[in-house]
Amino acid sequence: MIYRILRAINNVYGTIALFGFIAAFFIALAFTVIYPLVPILLIFSSIFLVVAVRLGYLALHAAERAVARRSLHRGVCPWCAGICHARQVTDKTVHACSGCSARYCSTGAQFIEHESVDSHYAAATHE
């Protein structure tokens, strides 16, 4: 349950941050003529807010992976609470859920299988 909440927040966090900065821009634009101190303060504070947003992003992803690692250590899928089986894929241990077929790395991140560039090149030259 906690994993699903953190995952949902992580999915919309960047969009919310972007719209927050766009709203700050329009507030600064509106106050440019009325009270010029507000845009100046928003410009200087936005530098620090970018750092705060980035740190929040990193903290949310770290929390999501920590919850996933704790679930995977118990052999339970973080998403659906089904049984996860550990398998060796190349040089990584991948935990595959039997219920929702989600796959996770040992770090708690979702496993995304990438095809190598060499395999694409080899397939293109042999055809």
Image: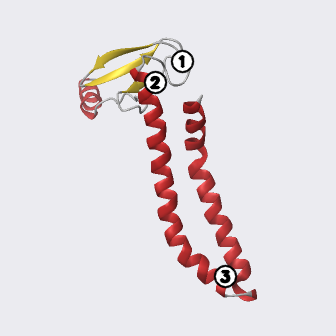
Q: Are marks 2 and 1 in contact (CB under 8 Å)?
A: yes
**How crowded is the residue under tag 1: few (<14 C-alpha within 10 Å), some, or many (20+)?**
some
Question: What residue does disc 3 label?
Answer: 38
Q: Position of residue 82 (x, y in %)?
A: 52, 14
Residue 67: x percent and y percent? 47, 32
Q: Indicate the quadrant containing the C terminus: top left, top right, bottom left or bottom right.
A: top left
Instruction: Identify residue for label 2.
Output: 71
Q: Nearer the viewer, mark 1 or mark 3?
A: 1
Residue at the image position 69 percent from the left and 84 percent from the top: 32
Helix, strand or loop at disc 2? helix
| 73 vs 17: above or below | above
Cα gap from disc 3 to disc 2, whole angstroms: 47 Å
Identified by mark 1, the residue type is Ala
Amino acid type, label 2: Ser
Q: SS class of the residue under badge 1?
A: loop
Q: Is residue 13 left or right of residue 118?
A: right
